[in-house]
Image (tube, rainbow, N blue to C red):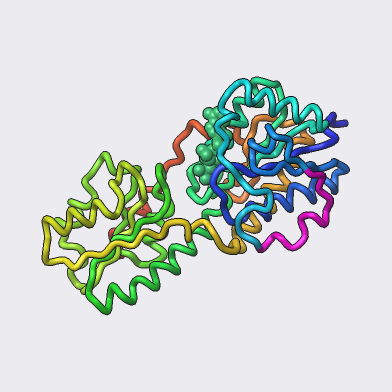
Amino acid sequence: MSAIKCIGILTSGGDAPGMNAAIRAVTRAAIYNGLDVKAIYRGYKGLITGEIKQFKTQNVSNIIQQGGTILKTARCQEFMTVEGRQLAYDTLQREKIDALVTIGGDGTLSGARIFATEHDYPIVGIPGTIDNDLFGTDTTIGYDTALNTIMDAVDKIRDTATSHERLFFIEVMGRDAGFLALNGAIASGAEAAIIPEIATEVDQLGELIKNGFRKSKNSSIVLVAESPTTGGAMALAERVKNEFPQYDVRVTILGHIQRGGSPTANDRILASRMGAAAIDALLEEQRNVMIGIRNDQIEYVPFNKAIKNDKPINRDLLNTLRILST
Ligand code: ATP
């Protein structure tokens, strides 16, 4: 028999579409297995301040289709300190919460790993971030929805790019990872993607200019990952304007539109599977693992691996994009 009778659940870091579907799945799977569920509001902040409510099955009704997170999310500096994490531990003891499920990105899992080690406390993580930058899972919750949002936006911008014969740099999210930019470019038929993974290897804009952008077309669209290593869309556009005044250049920064909206079927299914798997993992006495899905199989990925290992970009995709934009 597992010693776990009550689990806590929280969302932390940047919100991602599908987080609600994960909250629903964790809650329902826990109740199905006879566990109590306590919802913690505003991420690690709520753990410190004790913003907690018992959840029944109806608390998660009608949320699978909603973007954002009903538990709210926050960035919490205090949890970065030993004292802050002690307060969080005290809350868990007081509330008689035996284990935690945390949904969030790289930072959320880093915090979970430190806390779990410091207090010898069982935590299972669920990867919820549009950036898709966690190792050990093919995709993260929210990534597919964000990708579809980008594709829709680029489709619209293309109308103007074509009508005015312009070159558009469209900036998308992904500080350290080019998954959204690269796959967004392929999905929307863009000319190129400028991504952080290869920014230090080649001058991606230089290569594009050298090849004369798309010679056979009168407009071009380039997706740029917002990252200090790519320089961002504004800086790249300035460079083109200065060096090649003949190009009619425009910039669109998609910004927070990429985070919102109703999750796609893929994200809802991913979140539902991962949420149920998180409860299985706890009942199997797993701890300090992130739930991943690779090749359609659930995997338990140690926090260390999920956080520390860089998830590689598939370089074949770069080649595909290059070939298809000639
Ligand atoms: P996203 O990928 O969308 O940005 P994230 O989970 O990476 O999401 P962060 O803001 O980096 O978002 O982290 C969320 C919270 O996790 C932080 O506000 C902090 O409370 C906690 N956290 C992050 N890193 C650490 C750490 N090294 N030690 C303790 N807590 C941490």
Q: Quadrant of ligand 1?
A: top right
Q: Quadrant of residue 171?
A: bottom left
Total marks shown come to 0
Q: Is residue 50 visible?
A: yes
> What range of the chain is rendered magenta?
53-65
Q: Is residue 233 magenta?
A: no
Q: Residue 15: where, in percent of width, then height?
A: 57, 50
Q: Residue 221: where, in percent of width, then height?
A: 29, 65
> Along the horizontal axis of the image, is 142 left or right of 214?
right
> Along the horizontal axis of the image, is 158 left or right of 164?
right
Q: Residue 159: where, in percent of width, then height?
A: 33, 76
Tell me which residue sits at (50%, 47%) in the image. 132
Q: Nearer the viewer, residue 42 or 195?
A: 42
Q: Is residue 249 above or below residue 1?
A: below
Q: Is residue 64 magenta?
A: yes
Q: Quadrant of residue 169?
A: bottom left
Rendered-image quadrant of the N terminus? top right
Tell me which residue sits at (79%, 36%) in the image. 283
Q: Is residue 300 visible?
A: no
